[in-house]
Amino acid sequence: MNHSYKLQSRLSTFLPLLHIINRAPHFPPSSHLIVRHFITLRLTTPSTPKHYIDQKHTQSTMTFHGSSTVSGGIPWDELIKFAEEKKAEEAKTGHPAQLNKQQIAAISQLIELVHEIEVEDFWVSDLNQYCQQNKIPTPQFTQETFNQQVYGMPFPRSRVFCNLPSENTKFPQEGRGCEAGQQVPTFKKVQKAKNFAAMHALKYLRKEEPAPRGSKRAPSGSQESPAHARIKTEEDSSDGGVSMATPLRSGDHSVPTSTPLASATTQGPTVRERVAGLGERMGFGIPEYYIELDNEKEDTWKGRPIFRHDGRIPENMGVVEGVVGRQQAEILVAEKVLEWLEKEEKNRGDQYSNLMNSTS
């Protein structure tokens, strides 16, 4: 068997995988590059697994090597093996593992190589509203955008400062957004950096004391009641003082939250847990629930989910209005999200099965 025929035979082994990553939506786009890189490595190295040819019927039996959770799925064990080899290399040498630019670029599509602080997207509007209500001069924002070298590769990053003319100071600053000797945090998106700066400026204006150094937010799985969560500001100066549950202010009725539902219903926490698991597995992330007062006199509320990766989510998915009681509104949002995720998972499974049947 000549080299050309061997390579052609190897390639035929991976054709179904190429079809899957190109056409099946259940693989997020960010995973395509590293899977393609994996196939390239397997085709161009001597360790490429042999496929088995049924000589009697002169037809290739396409098979995937390495354990997979489903028949014909991605051989995740091979990726795990690659990571373990690199970890072992670092443990042995005491230095970062050697990766070429193609590998670094592929990995950066799957995970963030630069740690990024989580921050909500309402701080700029809250700061502007506070300044208007208290007749404070409008804050000014200055932006810095640059390439940060990570493993020898340039990654675009931004940092933003919020200048308060009335106070002749700017944020973030030492003790509010960064520690002594540390650089001001950077972000992939300018808007996120802007909200981070606005958050610390607003907390300063409200005279909220920064959290003691080293204090940590309560874990997201905490079983505190929502009522307690609404009057407790969870801060962490070591990672930017992100507030996931903010106290209600006079005239402020919107409450973004990532805390669990109260135990007034046994269904609530179960629904939230199922949503979190499905959302992560399907590449959307774990949602937060944004609940707003709809009609104060009637105590009706409206709400919607907020996903970190929402590019493929219908705009009105999970939206509820006119629900009596804030907690009930949050429960209904979670139930609607779960219903949509389960349908989406089934649709993807059907598409995957049809695709595999068409390539068999």
Image: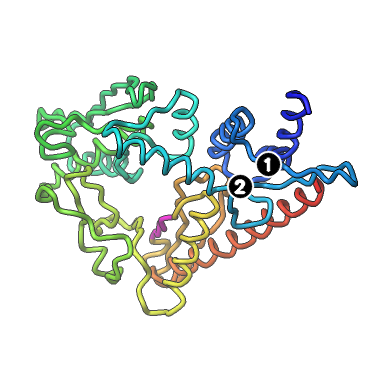
Q: Is residue 128 left or right of residue 165?
A: right
**Do tag 1 and tag 2 residues touch (Cβ < 8 Å)?**
yes
Please give the name of the residue rendered at 12% of the width and 47% of the height, measured from the top-left corner: 210
Amino acid on which the number 1 mark rests in the picture? Leu
Q: Position of residue 291 (x, y in %)?
A: 40, 59
> Residue 104 or 343: which is nearer the viewer?
104
User: As displayed, is residue 265 above or below residue 304?
Assistant: below
Q: Residues under labels 1 and 2: Cα distance?
A: 7 Å
Looking at marks 1 and 2 on the same chain, the residue that comes earlier in the sequence is marked by 1
Quarter assignment of residue 260 = bottom left
Please give the name of the residue rendered at 59% of the width and 47% of the height, measured from the top-left corner: 75
Q: Is residue 240 left or right of residue 166?
A: right
- The magenta segment is 287-292
Q: Position of residue 42 (x, y in %)?
A: 60, 34
Residue of label 2: 74
Q: Is residue 48 left or right of residue 146?
A: right
Which quadrant, please, contains the N terminus?
A: top right
Mark seen at residue 199: none
Quarter assignment of residue 127 = top left
**Taken as a whole, is the magenta stretch helix, strand or loop?**
strand
Q: Position of residue 218 (x, y in %)?
A: 24, 60
Mark seen at residue 17: 1
Please give the name of the residue rendered at 48% of the width and 46% of the height, measured from the top-left corner: 80
- Most extreme residue toward the right is 57
Q: Position of residue 340 (x, y in %)?
A: 59, 60
Badge 1: residue crowd in 10 Å (few <14, some 14–19, many ≥20): many
Amino acid on which the number 2 mark rests in the picture? Ile
Q: Dot 2 lies on which element?
A: loop
> Residue 132 or 255: which is nearer the viewer?
255
Please give the name of the residue rendered at 44% of the width and 73% of the height, measured from the top-left corner: 268
